[in-house]
Amino acid sequence: MTPPILDGAARTFMYGKLHRVTITGADLNYVGSITIDPLLMRASGLLPYTAVDVVNITNGERLTTYVIEGEEGSGTVCLNGAAAHQFSKGDLAIIMGYEQVPGCDLPGRISRAVHVDSANHIVSVDEYITPSLANLGSPANNRHNELYVSVDA
């Protein structure tokens, strides 16, 4: 069967994520958002005031908020405002940034995963290339049973 042709309709694409960051704070008395170290923002492509999904690995909570810059080199990842109810200092989280991309531009597009240690220092960055519909099922694209290995182990 011939795969359908991807058209120009916009699709939501995950372009970058911070994987298994440690939450460094939860501040109820702030207007809102998530404060992130600019080194982490730069590595993942996250820009200030852009929307992100934040998933709490520790308790399963998930929310959408926007990014603000923290102190560079601090390792800061702090949930602010109402979001602080869903996260505690020490929780593990994944922060994902998305963009709208025409479907025809998705094949070949890169998604970045920034891996950190327990102090939120970058230890590696993986880049994943989005396959075309015709290339789905290729062994090179198969990430089934790919387990996360702790960088602190």
Image (cartoon, rainbow, N blue to C red):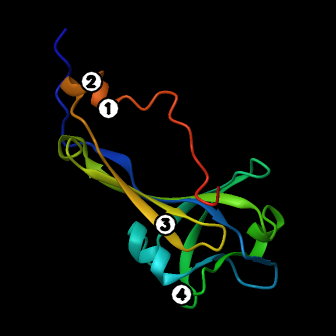
Q: Position of residue 149 (x, y in %)?
A: 58, 47
Residue at 47% over, 27% down: 144
Decide which of 26, 22 is in the foreground and name it: 22
* Mark identifier at residue 141: 1
Residue furthest to the top in view is 1
**First in sequence: mark 3 vs mark 1:** 3
Q: Earlier in the sequence, mark 4 or mark 2?
A: 4
Q: Do the residues bearing badges 2 and 1 touch, measured as CB atoms within 8 Å?
A: yes
Of pointers 4 and 3, the one earlier in the residue sequence? 4
Q: Amino acid at mark 3?
A: Val
Q: Residues within 10 Å of mark 1 (few under 14, many from 20)?
A: few
Q: Which residue was labeled with disc 4? A: 73
137 vs 74, left or right, is left
Secondary element at tag 1: helix
Query: Which percent across, then down, holds residue 51?
Result: 50, 66
Q: Position of residue 94 (x, y in %)?
A: 59, 57
Amino acid carrying mark 1 in the image: Asn
Q: CA distance from mark 3 to mark 1?
A: 23 Å
Give me the residue at 44% from left, 62% from top: 124
> Label 3: which residue?
123
Compute the Cα span from label 1 to label 4: 34 Å
Work out which quarter of the rendered image holds the C terminus and state it.
Answer: bottom right
- Label disc, if present, on residue 138 of the rendered structure: 2
- Compared to residue 136, the image places residue 37 above or below, namely below
- Give SS at disc 3: strand
